[in-house]
Amino acid sequence: MMKFEFHNPTRLIFGAGSLAQLGKAVSPYGKKALLITGGGSVKKSGALERAVSSLKAAGVSVVEFSGVEPNPRLSTVVRAAELAKKEACDVVIGMGGGSVMDASKVIAASVLYEGHPRDMLVRAGKAPRLPERALPIITVPTLAATGSEMNNGAVITIDDEGEKLKTFVQAEVLYPRVAVVDPELTVTVPKNHTAFGVCDIITHVTEGYFNGIDGTPLQDRFAEGVILTVLEWGPKAVNDGSDLEARTQVQWASIVALNGWVQVGTNGAYPVHMIEHTLSALYDIPHGAGLAVVNPAWMRFAARVRPERFAQFAQRIFGLSATGKDDLSLAMEGINRFEEFLRSIGCPTRLSELGIGEITEEMLFRYAEETLKVLQDEEGRLPGRPPLRKEDIVEILRMAM
């Protein structure tokens, strides 16, 4: 039976042209902003200049920190937090994709955190010491993918003390105060990263849909609505990046997919994300590309345990008929259709397509072990439906080869 609380305090300013409102949105929270960006695309597109102009017009001065990498590093977070302290910044703005926004959240918390920020990150067998304070956070996404602009989670790669482990933190203080979401900022995103973002959005929804509790019919329809919207509008955004209507619909789906609304009451786990995080930590592959490889393989594994759920997915999402088929056959047909969709928009669907090189059996076991270093249940399994032992993770990865 469902039993839950739902709370999302982030104010959302959404629509084409919304970037002009950035200064007005930020000024109630601070007068000196640490403005965090990634690899330089916002500067090339002119969006950064427009953002700075809006901030200065509202009386907000700007300290820039650029160069947040994909799969953001903890060492980068620490450097940015030190800059924020040195410059006495009182608000943090993350302008970029999910990596930039995630890093911005942890930077904002690190400025006021007592101790090293690695202690707030989840690791198996060690309870995180969650942040209780953070500078106000403002998010400005330039990619439709992670939904980080309107949730309280952040994914960070630990890269110190001889480690490289991609993990996460969730805390109340990490909710952005305001998300300024302007779909015009996404029209310059290349086809491949647009496609990877589409996969990320769908996977956020399928994680809860397949791993959540039974008896959530309304949430099922929420999830299916997001998926169907992305199946319709995602290819349009991939094929014509200047299609602002398509960009807008995909951007809104991205937000809804992970702002808590779709998943509320389902208590679902994220095994696909956990497995993929290991791959992107070790090889710096785009997160959405890794999900496109792992998710169909995980689905084929999990469908054996819960075929009726995957049969529902096949019928409701792809309109497949159940006539003359058992649940597992129908489930596999639906998974095949999903994989075909991912291929049609340019996503990889096999490990061999990620540029990793030759993968040995020993490497598969290492990936499974690294995944379980982040999250385990009381029996040492990765949470999900079904829970995954090390050998199960290896089998899923084999299926993805």
Image (cartoon, rainbow, N blue to C red):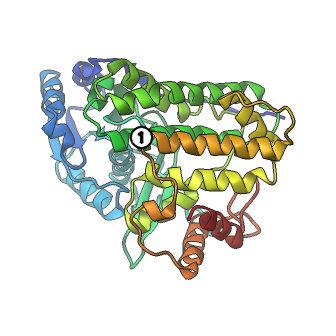
- The one of 101 and 23 positioned closer to us in this rendering: 101
The amino acid type found where label 1 is placed reads: Ala
The crowding category of the residue bearing disc 1, from other C-alpha atoms within 10 Å (few below 14, some 14 to 19, many at least 20), is many
Residue 126 higher or lower than 170, as above or below = below
Helix, strand or loop at label 1? It is: helix
- The one of 329 and 267 positioned closer to us in this rendering: 329
Residue 274 higher or lower than 160, as above or below = above
Residue 152 visible in the snapshot: no
Does residue 29 appear to the left or right of 297 in the view shown? Answer: left
The quadrant holding residue 51 is top left
Does residue 80 appear to the left or right of 56 in the view shown? Answer: right
The residue that label 1 is drawn on is: 195
Residue 44 higher or lower than 120, as above or below = above
Seen from this angle, which residue lies furthest bottom? 362
| Quarter of the C terminus within the rendering | bottom right
- The one of 19 and 350 positioned closer to us in this rendering: 350
Q: Horizontal and vertical percent for residue 296?
A: 61, 51
Residue 359 higher or lower than 91, as above or below = below
Seen from this angle, which residue lies furthest front? 324
Does residue 8 appear to the left or right of 36 in the view shown? Answer: right
Q: Residue at x 57, y 45 (%)?
A: 339
